[in-house]
Amino acid sequence: MLKVIGAGFPRTGTSSMKAALERLGFGPCYHMYEVMTHPEHVDRWVAVASGESPDWDQVFEGYLSAQDWPASGFWREQAAAYPDAKVILTVRDPQRWYISMQNLLTNGPRRLQSMDPSQLPPIAATIFGAMRRMGPVMSRIGQDTFGQGWTFEGGLPPEEIAIEAYHRHVATVQASLPAGRLLVFDVREGWAPLCEFLDVEVPADEPFPHLNDSESMQRMLDGMMAGDGLHSPFGQSR
């Protein structure tokens, strides 16, 4: 049963938030990396995106919190399914978010799509297949965000349109939840506001985790292509 629901877009510090929540006892935390390390999870998300009424306990079996897409693409449904869970909306400077999202699409989905699966190392081929199957899920989330007809292959909309979508999402989340249930959070704020919101103690003499999503993605893909397996910034490997 989820205790913390993520409502923020990718590239708003979601990797740092995963590490922070797990450090505070709200782990494991679901993140896109979970799909990559557990390709069998794709079936769960395909069912969610198809419009079926999902069993969220089954989707998040074994997890106490969630951040990042695909999970945060369905924050509203999770908030209804888990009325006692708190919601965290991660935010950052919209222009910097736009640039980071462009880097994500270039170094992630587009890079995988340009590869011949038959030439990939076994682990890379498995993950390639899983991410291909995630296509309809990510397209639904992207179209809900940027409008009908949007695809990962087409890249982000022009900056002005994408940033409008970003602001619209933030406003929608804030208008949908009571203040006591929602924390709008920039990871640069560190432990204090997060720990106060979750009613836990601030870790003593321990810096807030700051993980660079773009660099992590690049290293992970490079490792896969070299046949070294999948190494995530969270210490998991396959």
Image (cartoon, helix red, strand yellow):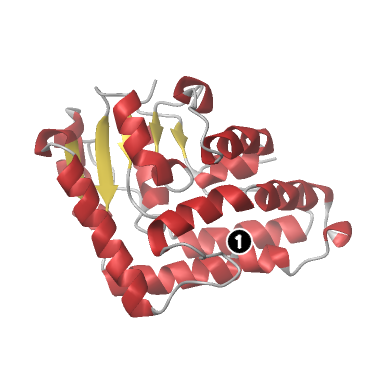
Q: Residues within 10 Å of mark 1 (few under 14, many from 20)?
A: some
Residue situated furthest right in the rendering: 118
Q: Is residue 158 left or right of residue 236?
A: left
Quadrant including the N terminus: top left
Q: How many marks?
A: 1
Q: Is residue 105 left or right of residue 210?
A: right
Q: Position of residue 98 (x, y in %)?
A: 38, 71
Residue 26 visible, this angle: yes
Quadrant including the C terminus: top right
- In this rendering, is residue 20 above or below 216? above
Q: Position of residue 180 (x, y in %)?
A: 11, 34
Residue 190 visible, this angle: no
- In this rendering, is residue 78 above or below 121? above
What residue appears at the point 16 percent right and 46 percent down from the top-left corner?
A: 175
- In this rendering, is residue 65 above or below 211? above
What residue appears at the point 60 percent right and 63 percent down from the top-left corner?
A: 108
What residue appears at the point 28 percent right and 69 percent down from the top-left corner?
A: 164
Label 1 element class: helix
Q: Position of residue 79 (x, y in %)?
A: 30, 32
Q: Is residue 52 left or right of residue 98?
A: right
Res 163 → quadrant = bottom left
Q: Specify the amino acid type for callout 1.
A: Arg
Give the residue at mark 1: 219
Along the line of sight, which residue is nearer the eye, 39 or 174? 174
Along the line of sight, which residue is nearer the eye, 197 or 20? 197
Q: Position of residue 158 (x, y in %)?
A: 41, 79
